[in-house]
Structures are given as C-alpha cells and as structure tokens.
Image: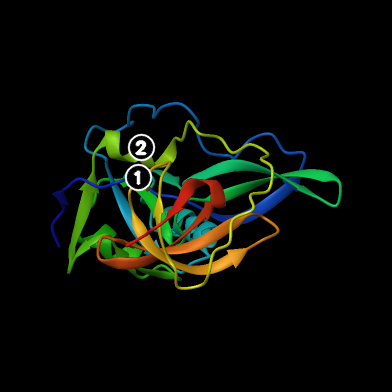
Amino acid sequence: MRAKGTTMAAIEQNPEEQNPEANGAGEPTEQLAPPVNENFKWYIIHAYSGFERKVRESLESRITAFGLQNRIGRIMIPTEPVTELRNGKKYTIDRVFLPGYVLVEMELDNDLWHVIKNTPRVTGFLGTGDNPVALSEQEVSSILFRSDAAKDKPSMKVKFDKGEQVRINEGPFANFTGAVDDINEDKQTLKVMVSIFGRSTPVEIEFSKVDKVTE
C-alpha cells in the first residue's frame, strides 16, 4: 500500500437525517482549519450507501480501541442543510452529497490501512488497487463547503422520463451528464446516474438544475 496525490471534482447529494426546525448541518460551512499534524492527509473511504454515519461511529470506536488517536484527525461526511415543507411544517435535513463516501484525515501506513479496511461496512479506499489517493486541502474544501444553500422554490412544470439523458447545469456536478434513474414529483428532484472515478453514482438534483439533452 502506498498513497499518492490526484485531483478530483466536488460531490453532490442524497437525503439522510432530519430534525424539525433545525438550523445547521453539523459539518463546517466556511473553510477547513489547519491539520493538527503536518503529516495528516485526506483520503476518501468507500462505505455502504446509507451507512456513512455508522461507519464514522465505527471508525471512532476502533481508533480508540487500537490507540490510534494521534494518527487520525477529522472524519467528515459531506452534507448540506436543506429546508423542506411537509404537512405545513418546515424540516431541515442533512443531505449527503454522495452516498457511500466518508472523508478521513490521517497519517496513513500499512497498519492503519488494514484497521480501516476491516471496519464494518467499509469496502475500500478511493484509488486503484491498494493505492489510496490523497486529496489536497482545496479538493476537500470544494467537497465539504457549498455556497448554494438550498431554498424553497416553486414547483416546476417539467416532464422527465426514467432513462432520459440530462445535463446538470449548476453546482459541483455542472456539465456532468447522466441518465434519470428516479423521479420525485413531490420534492421536485431527480436521481441521476453519473460516472465519478469510473463508478456509476446516484446524484439527487433539483429539476431546476438540469437540462434535457437534445440531439
């Protein structure tokens, strides 16, 4: 196992937890603080979709059990607060940008690699084979922090069909194209399958942020 650097695009969203009238998402909203250890680098861990928070809890427990507190820093799940109106009440949910991805700041070596790989619901690292990819601070910031906080919008009278090709026109996935996999008329959102790092990934996106792809 050896780490190496690369570049990457920022990542989008999927709903998860919710609390009535909550105000924040639980993740930072402006910029990353400097690492407490100059040898720390950021890596992306693949996890079972929908279990990102369980993976974070398991990692935190294993870090303590193995005495690795000085080798691992922050464990982050990219989220943004989105306000929805349901049954006359406002709810703010933490929406995950990309299902199945967890960001971990650490000083990675073979021993730590094995500890993380053997964590329940972890399937591996971002990278090829046994070579995890390290991210830059700028790349991590582009994933974690978003300036386009969601707002209540009127419903759009747009008809989409499953399997239809669309192009995303706003946000970190701008200019990505993909096929419509699911349509939620009530929330005015689509689930679009886009290719990220060669992996087909579902992205939940508002109707207003996609265009139909025409021949």
| Number of residue marks | 2
Horizontal side of 82 relative to 49 (left or right) equals right
Horizontal side of 46 relative to 107 (left or right) equals right
Q: Quadrant of the N terminus?
A: bottom left
Q: CA distance from mark 2 to mark 1?
A: 6 Å
Residue visible at 85% across and 52% down? 87
Task: Determine whether the residue tagged by mark 2 lies in a helix, strand or loop.
Answer: helix
The extreme front residue here reads: 215
The answer to whether residue 77 is seen in the rendering is no
Task: Determine whether the residue tagged by mark 1 lies in a helix, strand or loop.
Answer: loop
Horizontal side of 16 relative to 57 (left or right) equals right
The extreme right residue here reads: 88
The image quadrant that residue 35 belongs to is top left
Residue 177, given in percent of the width and then of the height, sits at 35, 58
Q: Which amino acid, by three-letter code, is at mark 1?
A: Ala
Q: Which mark is residue 142?
A: 2
Q: Quadrant of the C terminus?
A: bottom left
Label 1 sits on residue: 10
Q: Which amino acid, by three-letter code, is at mark 2?
A: Ser
